[in-house]
Image: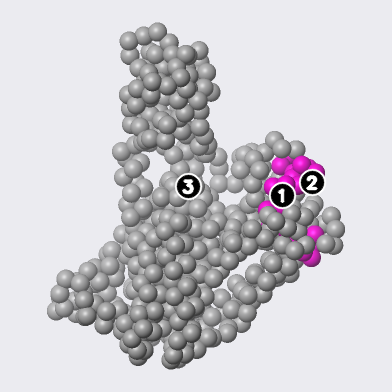
Amino acid sequence: MKRFFESLDAMAGSSDVPGLTRWIERTAFIFLTLMVLTAPHSIAASQTAWLIALLATIVRFAFKPRRKFKFRPLDIALWLFFGWAVVSAAFSYSPALSFNGLRSVGILAVYFMVAANIRTLKAAHFLAFALFFSCMVNVIKTPIERIVGRGVEIHGINFDGPLGKAALTNGDTILKVDGKKINDLAPLMSALETEDVVVVDMHRPDVYQTRSIKRADLLPGTTPEERLGIQSWAPSHYWRALGFYNHWTTYSEALQLIGSLVFGLLIASLFYKNSGAGAAENTARKRGPISLFVAFVTSRVFMAFCVAGVGLALLMTVTRASQLSFLISGFVIVALSASRKVLIAAVLVAIPVAAFGLYMMQRERQVGFIDSSDDSTQYRLTMWRDGTRLLTTSPRNFVFGIGMDSVKEHWREWNMYDGGRMMIGHFHSTPMQILVERGAPALLLWILILAFYGRILWRGLRAARGGDWRTIGVLLGCIGGSIGFVTSGFVHNNIGDGEVAMIFYLMMGLGVRTAELSAGEPRI
């Protein structure tokens, strides 16, 4: 145990502090690690770990020796961004809702906590590999779950039967009965024998809903199929991948960010060989099982497998914007690292991948990559028209915005969502969401944040050339991931998605500290 803590302190940069202070720093770094490990899977677990790490970080500033609190232009821009959100909430049409919405903006504190607790490049490398290694759990689960299938997909439905009367139709999949997952009809029939009404969770393309099935509607017959009014059923093999999240867009955005990180590490290991994976493997053979495991995780073969897995899982989300963003991220990473010949080869590889993605889109969503008749496209166009109209209604709206979440109370008087015929939601665009809800100054601050972040990463990458490939890989991955994040943000409100925003700010803190440490800046 003593050796473990000594290794932990050396990696976290806590070896130079005494007793209680060292334990506070250990606590912060341990829960930072737990946040990194749970971020690709669970918002509840990752936020709990983040809040404990943040509390330990704040407490640490009360103890000696004092850690330096660094103010970067990026930090100031982030504080101003949050401050303007407070001002906007004060001018909101629904102040109570908008002040409550500040919690989602407050996720940017993830960046400050991460940046405050990465004091060595070794810690930065460890956290980067921990993030993508943990993500492999849901990446591996996704195709396996698709092969095995899930739920009960019904066919040959009799619309006079209980399922037909419950508004289920051919091809729908019953996933749960009274909150419990099912893989055949027995649990449904058993529930109907004891309950007058059974609630089931069902799925059809792009829709997850509940239905109520009545025992009184059961048909005569001797088999479950006859009594439920269907001809056949089978496990479903077609749905948009969710990972461990509740929505495919959240999963695809998380995959884009983490996939960019692992792709950056892979490209760096291929083109910056001074301390490559092969050398790590040779050294590891002399150090025992733990070092062998580290060498395996950092090996090119394993990272290539991870990139392929992320790409497959991303295709299975059937989410156009995130897929395109990942391709753009990959091109940027290769362009910053490799020769023109390699870039051309990457383009040639991307062509069949893109073609397969279009095939998946057509098969599972029956839409093209750019399809004006698609319901989601029509929804976005409607929301952008509504947002533009609200923004230009008055100078107040342009400067302060309408207030976060105020549309929940005022959408009727503002004649939004096609008069209520469309789903009540957000504006499906990060720039539009920020501009309409918080005004033009907030959008300008957001652009400034991205510009400062990009400049830090670019300078760090230039300083890291010729150094450790892992440092270069982290910076490449953060650059690619941020470009992909901005690209998909034009049609996704990804900064408003808590799970995605947490990973983005986590990678921002990781990228900033890696850039600073690679440039030889003193530890904070």
**Circle 1 crowding by C-alpha within 10 Å: few under 14, some 14–19, many from 20:** many
> Is residue 274 highlighted in magenta?
no
Residue at image coords 42%, 31%: 178
Element type at marker 2? loop
Q: Residue 140: x and y, percent?
A: 32, 52
Q: 177 or 224, which lies in front?
A: 177
Q: Residue 510: x and y, percent?
A: 45, 74
How far is disc 3 from disc 2 in space, using C-alphas? 30 Å
The circle on residue 407 is 1
Callout 3, which amino acid? Asn
Asked whether, in this view, residue 487 is left or right of residue 503, the answer is right
Callout 1, which amino acid? Val
Residue at image coords 74%, 54%: 94
- CB-based contact (under 8 Å), mark 2 and mark 1: yes
Q: Quadrant of residue 38?
A: bottom left
Element type at marker 3? loop
The circle on residue 246 is 3
Callout 2, which amino acid? Trp
- CB-based contact (under 8 Å), mark 1 and mark 3: no
How far is disc 1 from disc 3 in space, using C-alphas? 23 Å
Q: Tag 1 or tag 2, which sits nearer the N-term? A: 1
How far is disc 2 from disc 1 in space, using C-alphas? 8 Å
**Circle 2 crowding by C-alpha within 10 Å: few under 14, some 14–19, many from 20:** few
**Circle 3 crowding by C-alpha within 10 Å: few under 14, some 14–19, many from 20:** few
Residue 513 seen in this snapshot = no
Residue at image coords 50%, 89%: 68
The circle on residue 429 is none
